[in-house]
Image: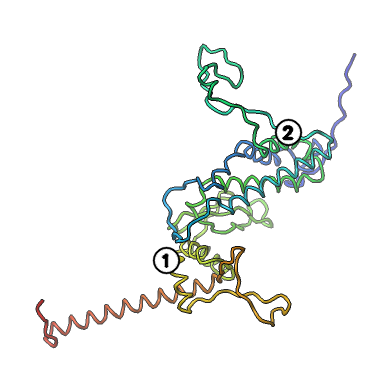
Amino acid sequence: MTRRPSPPATCSTCAWCTRPDPTGGNVCQPCYAPVHRAVRDMARDATEPVVNIARQARYGDRDGPRSTEPPIPVDLDASAAAWAAAHVVVTWMDHIARTRGVPLPTRQPRPVGPLCAGAGWAAAPGRCGHPSCDAIRHDRPEHPVAAAARFVAAHLGWLRRTPDATAAGEELLGAAAAMARLIENPADRWFAGVCAEPLADDPAQHCTTDLYAWPGVTWVRCPGCQTTHQTGPRIRWLLDEARDVRGTATQLAHAAVRLGRHCTAGQLRALVQRGRLRVATVPVVPFGAEGPAAADVDEWRRPRYRFGDVLDLLDQIAEQKRVDEADRARRAAERAKRIEVGEVEVTPA
């Protein structure tokens, strides 16, 4: 019996690179390959955010101010970031299962513990054969996010042929990048903004790669388009963009240190007590912007301040310190000169 050849797939145009796709996908396979790798990485690293949420991650020496407030044993920001990334994967898993009519994945038990199979051992998969290892090894269901990510990765070939291919790819890439930022070292480099350089092959498009610079350097290279940027204009741009940002004393002190200012949360609170720094305000809802205002506080009722006011105050303090040091140096030089000409008698110790 002769098998009939399959009819050729309808050629379509990739929504990302605008090249023809002979497989008929809304996004071509080369463009979707990074999505597949990102989802696979999420399945592999699904258990890693727990370390950051429990504040067990260590990133080396800390160069920012240390708060006098005792920290809670849970990193709520890390927990929120991990939940948001997991929510994206689980949402697309549910979409695939409902649309295709396939069952949701089951969490398969995986061996946890030593696995030291060596030459001469006829070990079964997931087992090394040592009785001592069998005694301390146990099976646990895989992480639910890992199971969801593996399910999504297995159906990406179908997903890229659907009208939701672009939205799914962008959301999954964003979730994977958020998880990578969470579990990797975030403390070494500072965010220098988006590259925004026109692309060489398409000047109408701009590079959207995030830039991260090492402290103390004067330039940063974009890993996407290899363009070199000076950090000075980047810092000034970030300062202008961040002036209206509001935060607690601890948050703003840490941000100020990152931008080259010398500041601690205790110093900011002392400036508040002296009346030099004021708490930010928000209008009372029933009255609007023209009515009375209330103090701006976060969800834990901690007062928040405007970052621009903090920067201006720190600049004033630094300038006053510079003027005082120059004045002391001038008076010391004048006194030394008078002593030299005999106008001032030196009292022996």
Residue 346 x/y as whole percent: 11, 82
Residue ID at (89%, 16%): 2
Residue 301 x/y as whole percent: 59, 66
SS of the residue under disc 2: helix
Q: Which residue is tagged 1? A: 262
Q: Is residue 46 above or below residue 241?
A: above
SS of the residue under disc 1: loop
Residue 261 x/y as whole percent: 44, 66
The single residue placed furthest to the bottom in the displayed view is: 343
In what quadrant of the picture does the C terminus appear? Answer: bottom left
Occupied quadrant, residue 149 = top right
Q: Is residue 278 above or below residue 69?
A: below
Occupied quadrant, residue 290 = bottom right
Instruction: Give the amino acid at mark 2.
Output: Ala
**216 or 327, which lies in front?**
327
Distance, label 1 to label 2, CA atoms, is 51 Å
Crowdedness near tag 2: few (<14), some (14–19) or many (≥20) residues, C-alpha within 10 Å: few
**170 or 318, which lies in front?**
318
Residue 154: image tag: 2
Instruction: Give the amino acid at mark 1.
Output: His
Occupied quadrant, residue 64 = bottom left
Q: Is residue 201 above or below residue 162?
A: below
Side (left or right) of 132 relative to 98: left
Side (left or right) of 215 relative to 303: left
Q: What number of labels is visible?
A: 2
Q: What is the basis of the colouring in this image? A: rainbow
Tag 1 and tag 2, C-beta contact below 8 Å: no
Residue ID at (65%, 56%): 206
First reached walking from the N terminus: tag 1 or tag 2: 2
**294 or 93, which lies in front?**
294
In what quadrant of the picture does the N terminus appear? Answer: top right
